[in-house]
Image (tube, helix red, strand yellow):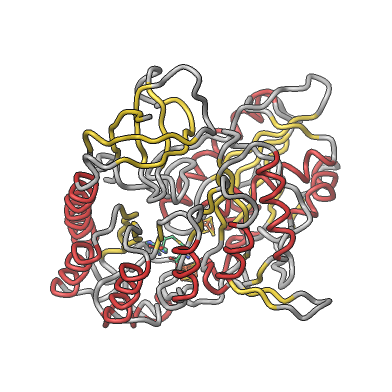
Amino acid sequence: MYDNNPTLTNLDNKQILHDRQGEILEQDGFVDDPNAKTFYIESYGCQMNFSDSEIVGSILSDCGYSPTKNMETSDLILVNTCSIREKAEDTVRKRLRIFNKVKEQKPGTLIGVLGCMAERLKHKFLEEEKLVDLVVGPDAYRDLPNLISTAEDGDKGINVFLSREETYADIAPLRLDNNGITAFISIMRGCDNMCSFCVVPFTRGRERSRNAFSIVSEATDLYTKGYKEVTLLGQNVDSYKWENPETGQKVNFAQLLKLVADVHPDLRVRFSTSHPKDITDEVLTTMAAHENICKYIHLPVQSGNSRVLKLMNRTYDREWYMDRVEAIRRIIPDCAISSDIITGFCSETEEEHQDTLSIIEWSEYSMSYMFYYSERPGTLAERKYEDDIPLETKKRRLSEVIAIQNKVSLAHNKRDIGKTFKVLIEGTSKKSELDFKGRNTQNKMLVFPKKAGLAPGDYVRVKVSDATSATLIGSLVE
Ligand code: SAH
Ligand code: SF4
Ligand code: F3S
């Protein structure tokens, strides 16, 4: 259903990053040490999960495991799971059946389920999926070495306690998905919003912000190692707040952005996700004041209709959202905005759906992640509202949303023809060995012919000559 759409990331599918315009980033690229025990990890869901897998990697390395991309030979197979929609969970169950086949060939192998699905299903997982040895929730990764020992002794290892404090601030992530140029930094965990459709508050627990100094030192360390771009991650970055327990000094998100931007002018800073109710003018003016803070905001609207937004418990209405977009246009005129959209939420009428179509055009999103509503057990919507929109209607509305977004994305990209952008080279284009790919500040992917002497990590200037709805095509300018 999603597959034909180039601007769409399907979070239900394998290993897709929320902010990466549909690009699939495999977690691989390791050197196998024949003497060490090895772990294999697959990650699903949002960027936070990918970031968490790197924390897991670090904890496992400390207890003697090295990463491998070969599932068949590994001692420990892990899957970091997502519960956001039913399909995301179905995908994981399918993967588990494959892991179990591998285990039949190599009986000592341990299989572990990490992340949101582990948290949501807890002990049920062990009952349903008999061959799972470990069930570990997102706040329990420090306990992995103990849980592995328990499982090696033939018992089941389970820890799904959610914490109010855990931020893994002191753990240096093992960079698994490593292009050596761009990296994620988790700045907070959990979510205190109660969007009625969303399972995240239940799987990730209460919101907590990570020590600002540990964030800045992680960014500094990455820059020293040659990285050129960091993405600060949280479910709602605008509500970041941290207080230095020694000095009482408070740091909000705008201040954190400035601290990270000051690490080095050549280190780009991105962030995700912004919540329309919380994004402040102070954040926008901080972005405008720093060339290296990328001019791109992921500002999910979910629906363009105020009644539906109220049912979704998003705590803003259409007018509030439009006011925030206008503030972005006023303060950062060249900023690109993207969105998340849900079609067919409980009781949504055709007119209300039209409001979603019109806000996509009005906001001129450079791209969107689009989904039809999937009822999740335990959420407010599941308890309070009837999931009454037929599947065909949800899907038809989704295809209308996709069609409008494609049109808007193409127009947005066509406007860039003739412009020259500063681009950070990320690597070789997937389509041609002869081309580089890289992003501009607006998070648009550019593809352009290679030139000797240039390498990933270099900043170059690229003039755009053509555009599709997903990519800008151009050539280097001196
Ligand atoms: N914290 C982010 C969203 C994280 S989840 C925010 O508030 O914007 C990523 C996206 O998945 C959401 O923005 C929403 O569009 C979608 N989503 C969440 N729950 C869903 C559900 N039950 N059905 C369909 N899509 C859902
Ligand atoms: Fe879910 Fe809402 Fe929190 Fe985003 S802000 S993670 S949609 S509850
Ligand atoms: Fe999925 Fe959990 Fe992220 S439910 S979207 S992996 S926070």
Number of callouts: 0
Please tell me whether residue 20 is drawn above or below residue 395 in the rendered image. above
Residue placed farthest to the front in the image? 478
**Quarter of the C terminus within the rendering:** top left
Viewer-proximal residue among 179 and 30? 179
Q: Position of residue 434 (x, y in %)?
A: 38, 17
Q: Position of residue 128 (x, y in %)?
A: 58, 52
Residue 130 as seen in the image, left or right of residue 368: right
Residue 18 as seen in the image, left or right of residue 7: right
Tell me which corner region of the image, top left, top right, bottom left or bottom right, holds residue 149: top right
Residue at 80% over, 54% down: 143
Q: Where is residue 8 in the image (x, y as percent from the top left)?
A: 32, 47
Residue at 71% over, 62% down: 167
Residue at 75% over, 48% down: 172
Residue at 45% over, 48% down: 90
**Quarter of the N terminus within the rendering:** top left
Q: Where is residue 35 in the image (x, y as percent from the top left)?
A: 83, 21
Residue 381 as seen in the image, left or right of residue 349: right
Please tell me whether residue 210 is drawn above or below residue 71 in the rendered image. below
Viewer-proximal residue among 70 and 420? 420
